[in-house]
Image (cartoon, rainbow, N blue to C red):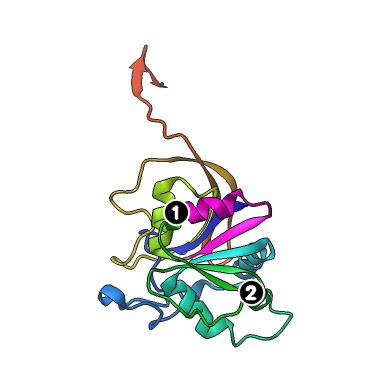
């Protein structure tokens, strides 16, 4: 399966609490809900496209529990997000969760990265990660993410959980797709590539990159 990561980000790289003030207040975060003002038809089309491609979900415990509380109540078959989350297999990475409660859920504990690699080795379409900051960081550091789908809102919040923190490895990316929404959010689809560094010099009065 192809492992894809789907994240909402601020311009300063924060992914914490996009959907509401009480979504994730850990670390004293008080600026949740920063994504909501930028929702529009373009935003909805991006998210619907994400879930339309999903075959299996992989989530961190906090994101799993937040999604469970909300989406398990959405029974409208026309709602693609609810239909996919309620109907498809879900894996949740947790060392403490015993009874997940949401149907079609399997708990991954122990060597989660090895188990994720096993899932990737299975035939199928997309194994999707949504949010799940700690898990996403671990997957990024292990080089297990095949595609990054990032929706960056035109807002800064100053502090909060970031996808790419100080110990993240250096990685280059190939841009697969990019577009802006009517309210100024920028959507990018990126695939990892080898990190490259270049050099700038002046040769016979001309700036030359090498």
Residue 196's place in the image compared with 70, above or below, is above
- Mark 2 and mark 1: Cα distance apart in space: 26 Å
How far across and down, in percent of the image, does residue 6 sit?
Answer: 53, 60
Depth order, front residue of 102/163:
102
Tell me the magenta residue range. 113-130
Q: Are marks 2 and 1 in contact (CB under 8 Å)?
A: no
Direction left: furthest residue: 28
Above or below, comparing residue 66 to residue 137 in the picture: below
- Categorize mark 2 by other alpha carbons within 10 Å: few (<14), some (14-19), many (20+): many
Residue drawn at point x = 34 percent, y = 76 percent: 31
Residue of label 2:
81
The residue that disc 1 covers is 113
**Neighbour class for label 1 at 10 Å: few (<14), some, many (≥20)?**
some
Where residue 10 appears, as percent x and y from the top left, is 41, 63
Q: Secondary structure at mark 1?
A: helix
The residue located at (70%, 85%) in the rendering is 76
Frontmost residue, 126 versus 50? 126
Q: Quadrant of residue 47?
A: bottom right
**64 within the magenta span:** no
């Amino acid at each position: 399966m192809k492992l894809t990561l789907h994240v909402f980000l601020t311009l300063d790289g924060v992914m914490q609490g996009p959907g509401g003030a009480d979504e994730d207040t850990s670390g004293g975060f008080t600026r949740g809900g920063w994504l909501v003002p930028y929702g529009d038809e373009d935003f909805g089309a991006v998210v619907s496209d994400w879930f339309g491609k999903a075959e299996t979900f992989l989530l961190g415990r906090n994101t799993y529990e937040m999604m469970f509380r909300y989406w398990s109540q959405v029974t409208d078959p026309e709602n693609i997000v609810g239909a996919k989350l309620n109907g498809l297999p879900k894996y949740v990475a947790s060392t403490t969760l015993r009874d997940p409660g949401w149907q079609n859920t399997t708990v991954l504990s122990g060597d989660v990265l090895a188990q994720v690699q096993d899932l990737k080795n299975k035939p199928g379409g997309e194994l999707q990660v949504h949010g799940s900051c700690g898990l996403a960081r671990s997957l990024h550091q292990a080089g297990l993410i095949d595609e990054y789908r990032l929706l960056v809102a035109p807002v800064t919040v100053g502090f909060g959980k970031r996808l790419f923190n100080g110990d993240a490895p250096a990685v280059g990316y190939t841009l697969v797709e990019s577009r802006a929404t009517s309210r100024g959010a920028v959507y990018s689809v990126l695939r990892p590539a080898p990190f490259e560094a270049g050099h700038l010099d002046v040769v016979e009065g001309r700036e030359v990159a090498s």
